[in-house]
Amino acid sequence: MTAQVHVPSLFARVGTASALTFAVGTTMLAPGMVNEAEAAAHSTKALKVAASKKGSPYRWGATGPHRFDCSGLTLYSYKKAGKKLPRTAQQQYNKTRHITRSQRQRGDLVFFHSGSGVYHVGIYAGSGKIWHAPKTGTVVRLEKIWTSKVLYGRVR
């Protein structure tokens, strides 16, 4: 459902560029941006896809549909939800909107890091747990986040 709004004062001119930005509830919308409700719908679907892969074997470099590495699982899950992610955990971190621990929601990505590099990614399931493909010899599973050295990202 779209509403038509005709309020000339909503237009702002900055240099030679102009933009229309307006508030709907507490969500800010601008041309080309995804609103929070749409982002949440994609995240919820991606989380369900990841959970449906429970028990799938880990394989380095695999992107599904039957075997996964960590970033392959997130890439596959979000692709099925209608969103495109880059291939590696570091690239996925670089592509997401970075959020704080207190802002995290189910379906957000959880990135594990050491120093300045991201080495692992999973999908936040709520209650301090993630769906992920841990390592060789394991399977996709739900697991408690085991360290405080994590960063969070929201797929746009």
Image (cartoon, rainbow, N blue to C red):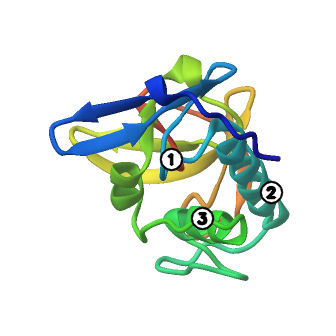
Query: Going by the image, does 32 lie left or right of 46?
Result: left
- Give the mark, 2 or 3, whose residue is nearer the N terminus: 2
- Give the mark, 1 or 2, whose residue is nearer the N terminus: 1
Residue 142 in view:
yes
Q: Residue at x 72, y 39 (%)?
A: 37
State the residue position of label 3.
83
Q: Residue at x 78, y 63 (%)?
A: 49
Q: Where does residue 57 sit, x and y in percent of width and height?
A: 69, 74
Q: Viewer-proximal residue, 8 or 65?
A: 8
Q: Tag 3: Cα neighbours inside 10 Å, few (<14), some, or many (≥20)?
A: some
| Vertical order, 68 against 38 (above or below) | below
Say which quarter of the image contains residue 63.
bottom right
Residue 147 in view:
no
Task: Say which amino acid is labelled 2.
Answer: Ala
Badge number at residue 33: 1
Give the Cα separation between the discs numbered 3 and 1: 14 Å
